[in-house]
């Protein structure tokens, strides 16, 4: 496998995972991943991390913390009971 192709594929991996590439570029990378086990391993690892982070980021923030942050950035009325 050409190391230049591997370097380019690994460089574009995050863009590929985020769907930020043209259809043509996605096809090229997909073909490379199917033919190159080391690059596919890197892709699989990064995809798993991305999925894990997405699941963890769905946790709901407590309403009082959300209100305090909104007040701190000026998107809410001040809470007269807040210190």
Image: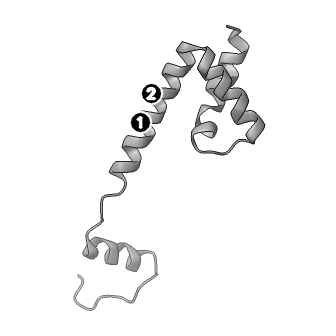
Q: Secondary structure at mark 2?
A: helix
Display colour scheme: one colour
Instruction: Give the image location of residue 64, x and y in percent.
Output: 25, 76
Establish if 78 lies above or below 68: below
| Residue assigned mark 2 | 45
Point out residue 3 in the picture as x, y percentages from the top left corner: 68, 10
Location of mark 1 (residue): 49
| Viewer-nearest residue: 22 or 54 | 22
Q: Is residue 69 left or right of residue 74?
A: left
Q: Which mark is residue 65?
A: none
What's the residue at 63%, 39% (across, down)? 15
Residue at the spot 54% in from the left edge and 21% down from the top edge? 40
Residue 10 lies in what quarter of the image? Answer: top right
Locate residue 14 relative to residue 83 in the image: left or right.
Answer: right
- Percent x, y for residue 18? 58, 44
Q: On the image, which quarter does residue 30 sit in?
A: top right
Q: In the displayed structure, would residue 71 be above or below residue 17?
A: below
Q: Position of residue 81 (x, y in %)?
A: 22, 89
Out of 46 and 28, give the one closest to the viewer.
28
> Which residue is drawn at the image coordinates 39% and 45% (left, top)?
53
- C-alpha gap between disc 1 and disc 2: 6 Å
- Secondary structure beneath label 1: helix
For the N terminus, which image quadrant? Answer: top right
Foreground pick, 61 / 52: 52
Q: Residues within 10 Å of mark 2 (few under 14, many from 20)?
A: few
Q: Are the residues at dot 1 and dot 2 in contact (C-beta closer than 8 Å)? A: yes
Report the residue at 41% width, 85% height from top: 76
Q: Quadrant of the C terminus?
A: bottom left
User: Is residue 41 toward the left or the right of residue 33 in the image?
Assistant: left
Residue 37 image-quadrant placement: top right
């Amino acid at each position: 496998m050409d190391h230049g192709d591997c370097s380019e594929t690994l460089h574009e991996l995050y863009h590929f995972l985020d769907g930020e590439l043209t259809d043509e570029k996605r096809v090229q990378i997909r073909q490379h991943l199917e033919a190159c086990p080391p690059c596919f391993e890197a892709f699989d690892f990064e995809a798993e991390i991305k999925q894990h982070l997405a699941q963890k980021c769905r946790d709901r923030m407590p309403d009082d913390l959300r209100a305090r942050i909104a007040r701190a950035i000026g998107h809410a009325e001040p809470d007269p009971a807040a210190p």
